[in-house]
Each structure stands twice: as structure tokens, then as C-alpha cells.
Image (cartoon, rainbow, N blue to C red):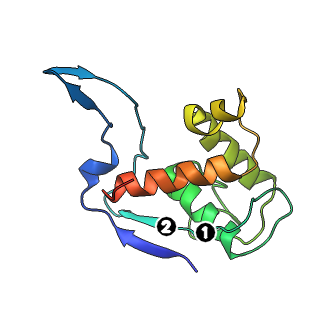
Amino acid sequence: MTTYLRLKSLYSIRSLVITMIIGMFVITSIVVLPKISSADTTIPLCEITRNLKVGDTGLDVQCLQRYLNWAGYTVSSTGFGSPGNESVYFGPLTASAVTRWQNANASKVLLPAGLSSGTGYFGPLSFGWYVSLVRIQLDLPA
């Protein structure tokens, strides 16, 4: 089941994480958050209890597709996997969307594993960063 939470503001969605040290701005990490329309201000919260790969099926796959579509890494523009028509099947289109998301978040999900490009495999590093992004967007403690 997908749970949705309302974000505090659209402004928080496009913000950067910046730390201020002694009156100077030092960028410690930059998080590019998805650009969404004013009509779409809820984030899908997914309960994923396993690694996901091509061939897997389940509600966790469907929720992952909802998140990817919401975050701007569209699984498909029409038909199965498209926004509002997410499926329970993790196929090549889902893997492609995961790969694009991983590449955009390479410093958090690829580099720690010694990888330079996305694999389409949604494992512990990908899930961990997804949880961090949810916490950032909902202004929850780490």
C-alpha cells in the first residue's frame, strides 16, 4: 500500500541543503529535489523490504514506480508504468528509470559502491538514499 504525506511547501521541494559556517556559505552537499507542479505536492512513501530488480513483481514495485514518476524519472509516458498507471512489474522501463535516478544521485548511491553509472538494481544504497530524501522533504530528523 502506498502512503502519501503532504509536503509543508512547494518551496521546500526545490531547496538545496546548505550549511553556513562563520558567515560564509560552504556547500557540504547538494540535493536536487524534483520539480513538480502545484497540483502534485505529495510524496509516495514506499515500504520496500527487499532488493528490487528486473522480473520482480509486487506492490513495492508499484510504489517505487509511483515515487520515480513523482520525482521526475518517468517510467513510461503512456500505458503501464505511466503516472497514475503504475504497475506491479519491474521491467526494463522501471530499470531505466531507476538507472536515471541513480545517475542523478550518484554520490549517494553509486560512488559508495565503487560504481560510476547506474545499474537499475534498487538495493540497500538506493533505498537508503530514497529514505534520506523523504526525510529531507518532510523536514524529519536524520
What is the distance, in whole Å, between disc 1 and disc 2 at their CAs? 7 Å
Q: Toward which corner of the image does residue 118 lie, by quadrant?
A: top right
**Mark 1 crowdedness (10 Å alpha carbons): few <14, some 14-19, many ≥20:** many
Q: Residue at x 25, y 48 (%)?
A: 11
Q: Nearer the viewer, residue 140 or 60?
A: 140
**Dot label at residue 44:** 2
Indicate left or right for 18 with 121 as reference: left
User: Residue 119: where, in percent of width, then height?
Assistant: 76, 40
First in residue order: circle 1 vs circle 2: 2
Q: Toward which corner of the image does residue 99 lie, by quadrant?
A: top right
User: Residue 5: where, in percent of width, then height?
Assistant: 38, 71
Q: Residue at x 64, y 30 (%)?
A: 111
Q: Residue at x 56, y 37 (%)?
A: 108
Question: Can you identify the residue that label 1 sits on?
Answer: 63
User: Residue 78: where, in percent of width, then height?
Assistant: 66, 60
Pointer 1 with pointer 2, Cβ within 8 A: yes
